[in-house]
Structure formats: C-alpha cells, structure tokens
Image (cartoon, helix red, strand yellow):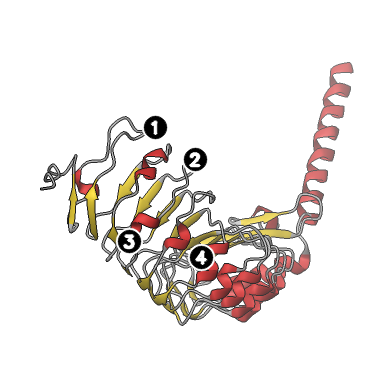
Amino acid sequence: MRPFLLCFIFFLFLGFSLMVMVMAEGEGCNPSDQKTLLNFKKSFPNSDQILLSWDPSISQCCNWGGVKCNETTNRVIGLEVSIQLNGTIPNVVASLTFLRTLRLRKNPYLVGEIPPAIGKLVNLVTLELSWNNLSGRVPDCLSNLKNLWFLDLSFNKLSGTVPASLSSLPQILEIDLSRNQLSGQIPDSFGHFSGKAPSLVLSHNKLSGQIPTSLSNMDFSRVLISRNEISGSALMFFNASKTTEIIDISRNNFAFDFSQAGFMNETLVTLDMSHNKIWGTIPSSITDAILLQNLNVSYNRLCGKIPSDWHMKYRSQPFDNSSYLHNRCLCGSPLPPCKPMI
C-alpha cells in the first residue's frame, strides 16, 4: 500500500508540474507581439517555406527561432532572421515596440527600401540590415533611434548621401555604411556628435569631395573610409592626443604633407594610406606607436629615409618592403639604401 501511495504522489506531482509548464507556455508570449510576428511572416511571398518554427499551435512566440523575449515582461526584444527572407521589409515590424535588437542579415532576396516605420522602434540598441539587397536612401528617420548603439547597413545597394542627421544619435558607438553606392561628401555634422565619437566605417562607396575640418574635433575609435573618391587632407585623423585604433584611408585621392602627421602612440594598431597622392616624409615619431601591427604607405609620393628603431610591443620584425613600395623617393631598409648627399 505504501509503495502505491508513493507512486500516486509522484505521478500527481508530475502531472501538476506538466500542467504548470503548459500554462507557462501559453502565457509566455504577449498576444500583440505574437500577432505582429505572424503578420511579419505572412508579408513575405514564401511565407509557407520560411520560419517554420513560427507556429502558435506548437509553441508560443518566445520559443520561435530568431525571437528573444524579456524574461520578466515576455515582450519581444530581439528579432534575428537570416537567409530566408524574400521580398521587402514590412512596416508591421514597427509594431514590435519593445524591440532592442533587429538583425535581418544575409538575405540575398531581401530588396526594396528601408521603411520609415523603423524609425518608430525607439528602443532599438542594435540595427543590423547588412548583406542584403536593399536599395534607396539611408532614411533620415534613423535619427529618431536615440538609444541606438550599433548601426550596420553594410553590403547593400543603398544610394544617395550619408544623412547628416546620424550625428544626432547620442549613444551611437558604430556607424557602418560600407559596401554601398553612397555619394557626396562626409557630412560636416560628423564633426559634432553629441556623445562619444563612434567608429566610422564608410569604405567601398562613391564618396567624394574633401573631409570637413570639423571632423578634427572628434576622436574616432576607427576610421575606415577606403575605396572612395575623397580628396584633400586627412590630417585631422592624425593627432597624438587621439585614441584611434585603425585608420584606413587607402585608395582615395588624398593629397597632403604626411610629415605633419601625429600618431596615437598607445592605441594605433593599423594604418593604411596606400594608393593616394600623399607627399612628404614619414615622421620619425611613428616609431613610438607601440601597438602598431599593420602599416601600408605604398603607392604615394613620399620621400626621404624610412624611420628605424621601432618600439613595437607585439611585433618582433620591422615592416617589409611591401609597406613602402611605389613611392617617389623613399629609401632605407627595407628599400634600397639612401644615396649619399653630394
């Protein structure tokens, strides 16, 4: 009798636990968010072939693939979808008002413009719409996202100019608009970010004109603006008082006196200014950049003796000749010796 009673209690407890789990499963998703997600899925022509876990008859939306919910409120705070989307970004996504992360990336058949409705997602911290086939302009409405830290619209077909309004994002840490078809100048407003200067990634576009002098006010952690058509000076990025880690201004039309450059001795890791029209000498102070690991000043108009006696902390060997080739009259190791002055 006693074993029977213990067995009965055990199964009673097990049944109660399962009932609680089922109840929790049913209550774990906000009905409004679940409806929005289903409408998001239905907006794509191939809805019957994608997001197969998004089935309310099997589980609630907090357990669906690519969906993340707040553990306390059960509101959807994250949406990440790759590979599957075919069509345009639907306006209905703006109804996920608690969303903090939106990643729709590597969807080669995701086309059309970025909908202005995304500007209503004011709780967003991360917006990543990279490696798609989005076109049109970068919308000004993104400046409404005052909580945004990371903006990544890279590897698309976006055109038009870089919105000056992005500088009004007070908490932005990185702006990546690389690998698009953006044109015009870098906005003067990018010298007036209200918060800490973000990483600036604008490489592989069609940007032109000169860099506004206002950018000298900013201490960008990374500056990647290679493969554009930018001209004039880039000296505003070279200052010993800054803390920049990467400067890549290669394959542009920059023309300035490099001998006037200063260097971030304790932070600079990568400097690539190859394929420009930069003249002057290489300042000897560059040898004090102790963290420098990558250097390319090739294909310019530099002259004079290459500095020696490097003080690099994590690189045991000096840079080879590929770092210096095709300049007007650079000399000294690893290039041929300088000719003696007569």
Residue holding disc 1: 314
Quarter of the figure with residue 181: bottom left
Does residue 107 lie above or below 319 as drawn? Answer: below
Structural distance between the alpha carbons of marks 1 and 3:
24 Å
Residue holding disc 2: 266
Structural distance between the alpha carbons of marks 1 and 2:
12 Å
Q: Position of residue 331 (x, y in %)?
A: 18, 47
Q: Position of residue 272 (x, y in %)?
A: 34, 54
Structural distance between the alpha carbons of marks 1 and 4:
47 Å
* Camera-side residue of 17 and 28: 28
Q: Is residue 84 visible?
A: yes
Q: Residues within 10 Å of mark 3 (few under 14, many from 20)?
A: many
Give the amino acid at mark 2.
Glu
Q: In terms of secondary structure, where does tag 1 sit?
A: loop
Q: Which residue is found at the position 35% from the left and 33% from the top?
A: 315
Total numbered circles? 4
Q: Earlier in the sequence, mark 1 or mark 4?
A: 4
Q: Residues within 10 Å of mark 4 (few under 14, many from 20)?
A: some
Q: Position of residue 122 (x, y in %)?
A: 72, 69
* Camera-side residue of 130 and 93: 130
Give the amino acid at mark 1.
Tyr
Q: In terms of secondary structure, where does tag 2 sit?
A: loop
Give the amino acid at mark 3.
Ser
- Indicate which disc residue 250 carries: 3
